[in-house]
Image (cartoon, rainbow, N blue to C red):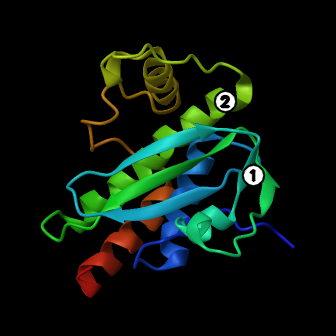
Amino acid sequence: MAKKEIYNLTKLPDKMVSDVVKGAKRFTRTKGYVPVIIRMTRYHGAHGIAHKCNMTNINYFKHPKSNKIKHYIPKWVLCNGGYHETWITGNKNVDPLKRAFSLFKVACHEYCHIRDFQEGEYIPHIKGSHHDSRPCELSVDNRLYDMRGVETFWEDDSWKLPAYAEKAILELAIWIEENKI
């Protein structure tokens, strides 16, 4: 039995969200079992965080507050390099295509952090440094630049996506538009 890799805690359809995230994993060429938690936020932008670990508790993914339950039993699984959490905006004023595309971009960014963890190239950040000037963030930006060939990955939305990612992003954006989520 295959282990579940994507834990969707949003109102969006599981298949569409997993297609976008799997497209990001394929685009960044990340290998192995890397659990992902997708959540909804009320703020404008998508964001994420990658966690470096070799083992994680997947019951936390299903129920984030489950450690407060009286008869809580953790279920530990091995993961390849770590896991990441990604938040997509739930703000209805943001264009659905932008929301779906930002989920893809943030997932790509976090998968690049996981690849750094897997390859042992992770450089811890200096406390108090600006986020964009941290060595680990510069490493991820360089990796994305090498993959895509676009220097301004975040600002340039005109770059060509692989067909599998473009299809998944458009399907999710259409679903968001039709269902007013």
Q: Which residue is denoted by mark 2 in the rendering?
A: 117
User: Residue 33's mark?
Assistant: 1
Q: How far separated are the C-alphas under marks 1 and 2?
A: 13 Å
Q: Which residue corresponds to the image point at 27% horizontal and 79% vertical from the top-left?
A: 181
Q: Position of residue 75 (x, y in %)?
A: 77, 64
- Crowding at dot 1, Cα within 10 Å, few <14 / some 14-19 / many 20+, comes out as some
Q: Where, by quadrant of the figure, is residue 154 drawn?
A: top left
Q: Position of residue 167 (x, y in %)?
A: 45, 66
Q: Is residue 161 visible?
A: no
- Looking at the rendered image, the quarter that the N terminus falls into is bottom right
Q: Nearer the viewer, residue 67 or 109?
A: 67
Element type where label 1 sits in the image: loop
Vertically, is 149 above or below 173? above
Q: Amino acid at mark 2?
A: Phe
Q: Tell me which numbered mark, 1 or 2, is placed earlier along the sequence.
A: 1
Q: Which residue corresponds to the image point at 75% horizontal and 69% vertical from the top-left?
A: 73
Q: Where, by quadrant of the figure, is residue 59 drawn?
A: bottom right
Is 97 left or right of 49, judged from the image as shown?
left
